[in-house]
Every structure is written in C-alpha cells, then in structure tokens.
Amino acid sequence: MFTLAEVASLNDIQPTYRILKPWWDVFMDYLAVVMLMVAIFAGTMQLTKDQVVCLPVLQSTVNSKAQPGASGKADFTTVETTTDQGEASAKTQKDSSGRKTNLDFQQYVFINQMCYHLALPWYSKYFPYLVLIHTIILIVSSNFWFKYPKTCSKIEHFVSILGKCFESPWTTKALSETACEDSEENKQRLTGAQSLPKYVSTSSDEGSPSASTPMITKSGFKFSADKPMIEVPSVTILDKKDGEQAKALFEKVRKFRAHVEDSDLIYKLYVGQTVIKTVKFIFILCYTANFVNTISFEHICNPKVEHLIGYTQFECTHNMAYMLKKLLISYISLICVYGFICLYTLFWLFRIPLKEYSFEKVREESSFSDIPDVKNDFAFLLHMVDQYDQLYSKRFGVFLSEVSENKLREISLNHEWTFEKLRQHVSRNAQDKQELHLFMLSGVPDAVFDLTDLDMLKLELIPEAKIPAKISQMTNLQELHLCHCPAKVEQTAFSFLRDHLRCLHVKFMDVAEIPAWVYLLKNLRELYLIGKLNSENNKMIGLESLRELRHLKILHVKSNLTKIPPNITDVAPHLTKLVIHNDGTKLVVLNSLKKMTNVAELELQNCELERIPHAIFSLSNLQELDLKSNSIRTIEEIISFQHLKRFTCLKLWHNKIANIPSSITHIKNLESLYLSNNKLESLPAAVFSLQKLRCLDVSYNSIPLIPAEIGLLQNLQHFHITGNKVDVLPKQLFKCVKLRTLSLGQNCITSIPDKVSQLLQLTHLELKGNCLDRLPATLGQCQLLRKSGLVVEDHLFDALPSEVKELLNQDTSIPFANGI
C-alpha cells in the first residue's frame, strides 16, 4: 500500500510557484490532501480488519413437507426418512442447548472468504481505492499546467523573472526617483520665479520650434522645456552590479513578453483542467450518491456449495460497514466543497477577460504612464499573481516601462562616464580644436556638458540622445556631429544651439532620423547631410524647409539624388558652397543651379554626369568647380568658363576625358587644373598659355612626354604627372623656379638632370617607381628639400654623397607647403 508521504508527493509544487496559486487552488490542494488521508485510512483499515462473518440459515422442518409423487413407494420412503430425521433432530434438541450445524472451523473460513466476494457490494470493497484514484486525478488536474513542458517552461521563466524584478534594488529606487522628481517639480512650480536657467536666449521668438517640433517630451518622467534640469537625487546612485542586473532584467522582460504574448496556451490549459475537475466532481457526486446506501452491516449469501457443506444460505455481517459509511459521508462532504470551489473558479475565469491586463492603476500610482497593457498568457499570469499579491505586478510593471529603462540607462551612464573619464577622451583635431567623440552609448552623459571648453562634439549611434539645458554652459561649442543619432533637445538647449551652433553634421539611414529642430538653427553656417534619399523624398530630402537657415553658407549632401532638391533654392541666395556626393545615381535636373548666384564652390561628385552642365555657366561668382568621379568624355563646353571672371579652379579628375580642347586657353584666370585619372595621351600647348596656373595635376593618364612649353608656366608651384609614360624630363621644366611640389613617380624616367638644383623652393620631390640608377648630387642645392619630402627608393638615397645626405637629413622649422 502507498504511504501518505509517497502519495502526497504528487501534490508537491516548487515553492516558487506559490505566487501562481490563488486561494482556491491552495484550498483545493488541502482538500485533496484530506481526501488522500481518507482514502489511505480507509484502505489501511480495510486491509487489516475488513472481513465478513457468516452463519448458515437453518431451514425449518415445517417448510419441508413432502410433495405427492407419482409412485406411492417413493412418497412413503420420503415421508419415512423425513420422519426419522425429525425424530433425530428433536432428540438432539433435547440433548443440547443449541442447534448443531455440522460445520468445522475450516468450512467457516471458506464460507467467510467466499461470501466476502459474493455477498458484499463492490462499492464496499473498492471504495478506498476509488477515492484514492479520484484524488490523484484531481491533484494531477490541479497541477498539470506546472508540469506540461510547453507551459512549465514559460511559468518557470516568468516566476524567475518576477522574483528578480521584485527584489531588484532598481525597482525601489525607480519608484523613489519618480516620487522625488514629482516633489521637485512641485517645488519648482512654486519657486519657478527664483530659479533661472544658466543661459537665456537673447533672440526673439522668431525661429523657435513649433508644437510639432520634436523637443524632449516624456510620459512618466517629465522634463520641462522651460526650467533647468533637476539634479538627480542621491537615492538614484545605483551600484554598478545592481545596474547591470537591472539592465539584464529589462532585456529578459522584453524577450519574455514577446515570447508569451503571442499565444494563450497557459490560459486554455488552466481553463481545461478546471473544467475537468468540475466534470469529475459531478461524476463522483452522481454515482456515489447511488451507492452510499449499499454499504450495510447485514448481507444474505448464497454460495451454491451445498454439496460441500450441506447448507444453501448464510447470513453475514460486515464489520467495517459502519466505519466505511462514515468515511464515505466525509468524502462526499469534501468533494462537494471541492466542487463548489471549482464552480467558483470557472466563474472567476469567465467573469472578466483574463487575456487582457491593464496597468492603469500602476500607472496612476507610480507615474510611469508608458507601461503598456499586455495580453494572452502574459496577462493571465499577471492576473494569477494579483490573487497572491498585487505588489508583485506593480513592481514588475517598472520593467515594462521604457521611461524606467531610459532612466536606468541614464543613471548607469552618468555613474560610469564621470567628468574625469570624459576629459581623458577629449582630443585635438587637425584644426587644433578640442573634440569629444562618444560612440554607441545608451545616452549622453550629464558630465559632457561640464566640458565648457569643448569646441566639437560628436555623437554616434546613440538613439536615445537628449540635449538638456546644461549645454548652455558650453560657450565654446560651435560644431556638432549627429551620426545615426536623432537627438532631442530641450527648449533652453535649442535656444542656445540656435544662437551659437555654426557647423552641424547629420548622418542618417532614414530621413525620419533628422531632427526637425535642425531646420530652425538660424545662425548655422555649415550643414552636412549624409544618408540615402530617394526621389520621393527630394522635397529637401523629406525635410522641412531650409528657409529659416538664413546664414547657411555651406551645404554638403551625400546621398542618391536624381535632382537637386527644390528646397535648396530657399537658401540658394545665401550659399557660397554646395557639395553633392551621389552614390552613382545619375543627377539629371540641374536647372535650379542657376538660382545660386552667390555659390563660389560647387562639387558634383559621382553623379554620372556625361558633360559639364550648362547651368553652371550661369554662376557668375563661381570660383571652383569639382566634377570628380563622373562619366565625362568631352569638355568642349569649357570655353564658356571665360565668362566667369572669378573662376580659378577646375577639377575634372576621375573621368573619361581623352583630349583637352585648345579653347581652354580662354580661361585666363585659371590657377588650378586637376585632370588626374583620365585617358589623356598628350598635353596640348594651350594648357601652357595659362600664365596664372599654379597647380597642374595630370597624374595617372597615358602621357608619354612633357612638352617644352611647360617652361612658360612661371607661376607653377605644384606639378603632378605620376603614373604616366614619361621617359625624359625637358630642361624647360626647371625654369619653373617657383615649383614646390614635383611628382614624377611611376614613369619611365632614366635620369634626373642636374638642373634640378634651380628649384630652390622645392619641398616635395617624388621619383619612386622609375628607371633611375642614381640621383644627381645637385639635390643638395635645393635648400628646402628634406629627406621626408624626397620619395625615392632607399638604395638611391644611400648612393648619394654623404654631404648631400647630411643636408637632406637636416631638421628645418620651415613648414612644408605641399597643398594640392
């Protein structure tokens, strides 16, 4: 027989699951234990004491009258025999005090055992076992959802996360933070006139953002745009380990929600097992009521073994009948209570929609107004938890709030990135400006805005970047980089940026990442926009109008434009430099260029242009044109540049130009000509009639020789002919005494004339990749040339006379002027 401990183990659930067992489940568990005890007690009593005791029923001689038969002899014999037996019985009765049954002990045991199975009702014999089986089924039904793999895994995960969320230090500190913040806001509201921001804009309301402008707005934590930032109270100082644990909990809750909200298996299984228990209760009650009266003390037994013992009928007593009947009544009472609880459970399951759960009350109490409502199994589990303690769901809701998560990130970020650590990351760039580059952080640390001497701030891959009013302390800040960082700003911060920011770089994947406040920075001088823009978004790149950028001078767009956005014309009169770098998309419509009358520098790179756009020749103030990396094959239109009196620089590198037209001689003011990486096979004499030419770059073409006319370029300072087929250097080249940079690498030159000593201003000489066997000793007479500016093979340098090498190795304080 089972022991109580062995059977009760079926009802053992991990203690952590207790939070998912409402009062009715707990009560039913206790009822099941009591029913188990009833079953085991009854079974034990039955095994040790249950039996029947039987005595034969003696038939009266009066009832044994002879029946008339067909043969008179037979009747006589029968009567005689009966008479003799009667006389013998009468004699026996006279001799003894009782009736003799002629049964010995073994025969009584045999009859008792047989009548136990024949005369005793089946329910009296199997009642304890039925109770045990029914109870086990009810226990299994109650706890099946804790055991079934597809629900057990989710429940175990939920209970684990719930416990950690309840005990996490962040839960208490987050709730305390909102309480402190609310009190601080109330104080600020009462004493607002006494607290003024550190920076107050001197500008008029013109240019301030509209209601649709994405300044910082939050639900839950409310950061006002009209008051200074509130200092974080000391209660929010979080241990690093606790902060990391809280971050992990946010991620676990997010993944668990996504995993559980898509199904309602747990809910259906719980409803199913409750229905099974209810049906089981009805079934037990119905058939038990019919058999309760069959358990009685007296029974008549007809074993049909007269040939063995001489008697046909026995009267038996069941000694356990009274006890079993009392236990059965107790069991029926327990099962009735159990059934009514099942009915109540079904009523609770269908009374309200348990597949929906609202945190409305939690939102009101905790000020986390962004806690989302949940559904399906996630909602059902939270409803079950509420039956245990509503505090669990309240504290759990903190980890569903994005406001809470962002606040945690902010606190952890400020704890990690202190002022001293940020100061170590500040560097000086090529322009000798102090810059700070922050990459892939959860936000912008508050200590950044204490770096008041910072000139440039770069924020990259910081999706939750917020710029508070404290930025007004950074009076030196003039350049801001936002790389995949749709930053939000407070009103005071915007006022400061509007008046102080001069240069802004915005890199994005989608135009929605560009903050709308960018278009309201009226004092902005330079704007760099880098990202994909399709033709549908070309209404200034899906942006708002640039009309407010009245002081914008430089606009740099690196994208995939098919035409110049019409909204550029809003700022066209102010622009002095326009740069469009396409990704190979053909730029077709260029008529709007005509409106940019003040543009001095124009770059149209990688735009698949096949000719120089005619609209360019209308730009009367144009000084520099860069058409790098296009598909230009002919430049016959170059003659039209003669009408642009200020035009001085033409960059046509990385194209497919095969010839330079002689009409280039009409561009009298041309000072720089870049034709590298084309398909040139010669340099026409017209190029050398440009007396003002200071820089000529024809590198990486197929030019076999340098014309002698190069000597006419007396103002030439930079000459690049690297990567061609030149084998001889004309002596006229060395008449260009103002040369500072001479690039002759990767050609077929066999010797360098001694007249190279005439280039007294030479600072950079490239000779590597030629067929030289020696260098002229007269290189030592180039007073400004040093080894760092001499690009040759090591063995050629080592072959120079020692005094020449000494001259070339000397340090100089004269800055190099390599400028290309």
Image (cartoon, rainbow, N blue to C red):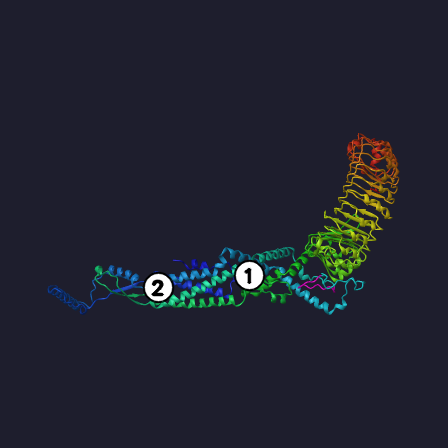
Residue drawn at (82%, 47%), measured in percent from left and top? 624
Q: State the image coordinates of residue 817 (x, y, percent, origin top left).
A: 84, 42
Distance between the alpha carbons at the discs numbered 2 and 1: 45 Å
Q: Which residues are magenta?
A: 216-227
SS class of the residue under badge 1? Answer: helix
In this view, the mark in front (2 or 1) = 1
Q: State the image coordinates of residue 631 (x, y, percent, origin top left).
A: 75, 44
Label 2 vs 1, first from the N-terminus: 2
Q: Is residue 603 magenta?
A: no
Quadrant of the drawing holding the C terminus: top right
Residue drawn at (83%, 53%), measured in percent from left and top? 598
SS class of the residue under badge 2? Answer: helix
Mark 1, Cα crowd under 10 Å, few <14 / some 14-19 / many 20+, is many
Q: State the image coordinates of residue 716 (x, y, percent, origin top left).
A: 86, 40
Residue linked to disc 1: 376
- Residue 739 seen from this side: no
Q: Main secondary structure of the magenta part?
A: loop
Residue 729 found in image quarter: top right
Q: Which mark is residue 123?
A: 2
